[in-house]
Structures are given as C-alpha cells and as structure tokens.
Image (cartoon, coloured by chain):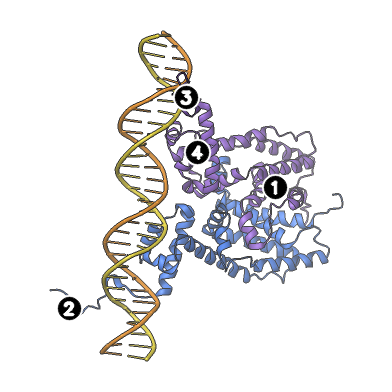
Chain colours: A blue, B purple, C orange, D yellow
Amino acid sequence: MTSVKEPARPNGRIRDAARTRAEILDVATHEFARAGFTGARVDEIAARTRTTKRMIYYYFGGKEQLFTAVLERAYSVIRQAEQQLDVEHLDPVAAIRRLAELTFDHHEAHPDFIRLVSIENIHEAEHIAASAELGEIGSPALDVIGRILAAGRESGLFTADVDAVDLHAMISSFCFFRVANRHTFGALFGRDLVAADQREHYRKMLGDMVIAYLTADRATD
Amino acid sequence: MTSVKEPARPNGRIRDAARTRAEILDVATHEFARAGFTGARVDEIAARTRTTKRMIYYYFGGKEQLFTAVLERAYSVIRQAEQQLDVEHLDPVAAIRRLAELTFDHHEAHPDFIRLVSIENIHEAEHIAASAELGEIGSPALDVIGRILAAGRESGLFTADVDAVDLHAMISSFCFFRVANRHTFGALFGRDLVAADQREHYRKMLGDMVIAYLTADRATD
DNA sequence: TCACTAATGTACGAACTAGTACGTTAGCTA
DNA sequence: TAGCTAACGTACTAGTTCGTACATTAGTGA
C-alpha cells in the first residue's frame, strides 16, 4: 500500500540556500512595504514563503536585520538603474530633462521602494545607519548630474546656484511626493496624482520646472 | 494620625473632560508621530498622560479612532494657519514667493505633522477616508493660489499651464521631502537638508524654482 | 559509502498588547 | 441635600508576536 521507493522528499523540499534567501527577501520586501516595519509580521512573511520562520532567523538573524537586507537590495536596484543612465551625449538642457523623466519613471515603476523609504524615514534611517553596505555611498546619478551641470554652466545656459545634490533633491521631491503622498493628497484634494491620463502632464511639469529653474534669467533677482 | 478633613482627592484628581481629551490627543500625536500607527502603543500613550488607558477608549473608542482624531486636529491646525494667509495685496510674483516661503516655514515648524502624513499614506489614507471631518474639504490656501494664479496670467506674467492644485503639489513636494526624507537623504548623500545654515539657501531655491516655472518664456518650447 | 555540516522543520514559550468587565466618585441639578 | 450621571480607575484576559530549543535531513567531500 504505502509507496516504497519514493525519494523521501515531502513538500518537494530541495535545498537551495540562495533561492530560499531570495524568496524570503522578495516576500519581506512586499510585506514591509505593505504594513511598515512594526506592522509587518515575521510569521506572515514566513507563511508566504515556501520555507519557515526558522529560516528567516537562520539567514538574517532577526526582523531588524531582515528589514536592513530588504533596504540594501532595494537600493541596489535603483543604483543599477542609475548606472545605465545614458544622457551625457545630449545637450545639457535635454540631458537634465531626460534625467528628470527617467527619475519620474523609476519612482512610478517602484512604489514599493518609495514606501520602504518612507518607512525608513519614520525610523530615522536607523537601518541604513546599521548597514555597512548602505553607508553614504552616494549614487551614480549624482556624478552624471554634476557633469551635466558643469557643462551647462560653462556654456552659459545654466544660471542657477545649485550643486548636483540639491538638484537631485529637487527632482526627487516631486517624483517622491507624487507617489508617496498620493493617498492623502487624493483624499483631501480629490486629485489622483498618479492617474494614468495625467502622467504626461506631470512628467512635463517636472521637466519644465527643473529647466526653468536652471535657465532662468536672474538679472532681475 | 490620619488626616481628617482632606478633600478626599487622591492624585489631585479633578474632573475636566476637555482637558483630559486634549491631553490624550497631545500625547497620542507625539507618540503616533514617533512610532507610526502600528508602532505606537496604547498603553504607552496612556502612561504618558495623567489619566488611564480606560479614558482613551472612553473618549475615542479605540486606537484607530484615536489616530483619526489626531489627524483631524493636525489638519485643523494647518488649515487655521492657511486662513491667516495675507499675500493677495502683493503682486503675483511676490505673492507666490511669499506663499511658498510660508509653506516652507510651516513644514519646518511642524515635523510631527509631516510624519503623521507619511504614516497615514503608508496606511493609504484609510483614516482620512473614515473621517467625516476630513473628507475632501480642500484647503484655504488653494483658493488663494487660484486667485493669484489668475491675476498672474491676466497680467501676462505667468505662462505655465497649471492650476492651483498642481502648484500646491509642486510647492508641497519640495517642503515635504526636505523634512520627511531628511534621514535617508542625509545617511545616503551626507547632506542635512534641514541644517540651520542651509535654511535660507533652500528657502530661496524653492521660491526661485516656482517663480521660474511660472514665468518661464515658453516661446521656444 | 560514510561522516559531517549546511540547511531545514516542529513545537513551544515569554512578553507584549488591544480591549473590556466591573467598580468608584466628583460635581451638578432638582 | 439627595440622587444621578459623566468621568474616572483597577484588574484582568484573550490573542498575538518575536524569538528559540531541539530534532531532522540533504548533499558534499574524504
């Protein structure tokens, strides 16, 4: 009656450390983004993987370290995207506009990342501080912005007194706010900032804003 | 030995519904802003008041409703501030700049409010949705912006294709990001967006940006 | 093929946490 | 001043939640 020569593998359990680790990270990313650090449940994360809670502690050590690992991977994704940036062949104005648009697109495409950043700020960036990997490495985009800015100033096109970090903050502000605060903004003002049919409007608005700022005639200031 | 005619008032307990309610709200505001909705503890909030947890349930019903009440009061503060706005006697450019600066100042002065908004967005504005008081009432600032925008367009100064809500989003983005994301931004890029000695720089940057956007020469677009 | 270790699973517990049942009293009003 | 009710306090519970002790096995290298 009972099977005799089955490969004694209940649940199809195959050992694969990398896969298990990655699966935990996937699920944890989604769960932390959904519910926040405190709101996320270790048991819930475990239940949504093909492994058990024991493995979370085995691979990551605890809830805090798991969240740190989630952040590390999330930031590595954006950094990789920034390394693909290819705008320096354009003239400064077009290059900045393109960069702003890519930032806009990236924020829109990764709402979970935006939520993780919001959550990490509620916790005053303590997990980033605890991460060896994430400590102040800057970003590839910053170098690109710096070079475009220099070229634009040299040619006399750009008049604004900003450096790359400030401009990055300006561009990110708009992109971040639009995604992160869409719920309260929508509830209070009745406008969905992420509505599909408004996408081009806001994308252009961002580019116009940044270019206008950089190229404004400041003679009368 | 024992006191005879003391006013039988252990702990100086005086009944004052309004004061008790307000004290709970004060403490809860701070505690929710500090730890998030899930992270905040009802017991902890109660411990920091002069009353007991029982009173939280007596006055507010539960943790969710308490958070909603906290949001209602926080938004009423900003609305009151907006009602004091007095910029329409200025020319459109000066008026918008002044408005941006006041928004900037208000964000800087109320970091707890910013955190509450972040938290409420993590929860997809469900408490605002549950509040009769907070449902899509707009904001006094929106009317002001609308009138300034109309005046600016009429005089030919403003060329941008935005309405009051969009402009409000643009201004808020920068102010919000600077305060809300200062921790991750500082940790990653080594720049404190809220440093006192950079305050004027960012305040001017915001005004310059908004004015440049509104008044840009769009003939070449 | 044997032994060893990395990888995995089960079961449990201690501490916490939102919420409540029940009892008390200050202060107002008739 | 008697009585009533809004305001308040104490003590408890049911359910949750992070973390771990202990047992097991797949797969690899000697």
Q: Which mark's residue is nearer the viewer, 1 or 2?
A: 2
Q: Which mark's residue is nearer the viewer, 1 or 4?
A: 4
Foreground residue, B182 or B14?
A: B14
Residue B116 is left or right of residue A172, and the answer is left
Asked which quadrant contains residue A3, the reply is: bottom left
Label for residue A104?
none
**Mark 3 Cα within 10 Å, few/some/many (few <14, many 20+)?**
few
Chain identity of mark 2: A
Q: Distance between the Cα atoms at labels 3 and 4?
A: 33 Å
Tell me which residue sits at (45%, 60%) in the image.
A63
Q: Which is nearer the N-term, disc 1 or disc 4?
A: 4
Amino acid marked by disc 4: Thr
Element class at badge 4 = helix
Residue B134 visible? The answer is no
The residue positioned farthest toward the right in the image shown: A219
Whether callout 3 and callout 1 share a subunit is answered yes
Label for residue A4?
2
Amino acid marked by disc 3: Arg
Whole-percent x and y of residue B146?
Answer: 69, 38
- Name the residue tied to disc 3: B9
Whole-percent x and y of residue D7?
Answer: 46, 26
Amino acid marked by disc 1: Asp
Asked if the residue at tag 2 contacts the one at tag 3, i.e. Cβ–Cβ closer than 8 Å, the answer is: no
**Mark 1 Cα within 10 Å, few/some/many (few <14, many 20+)?**
few
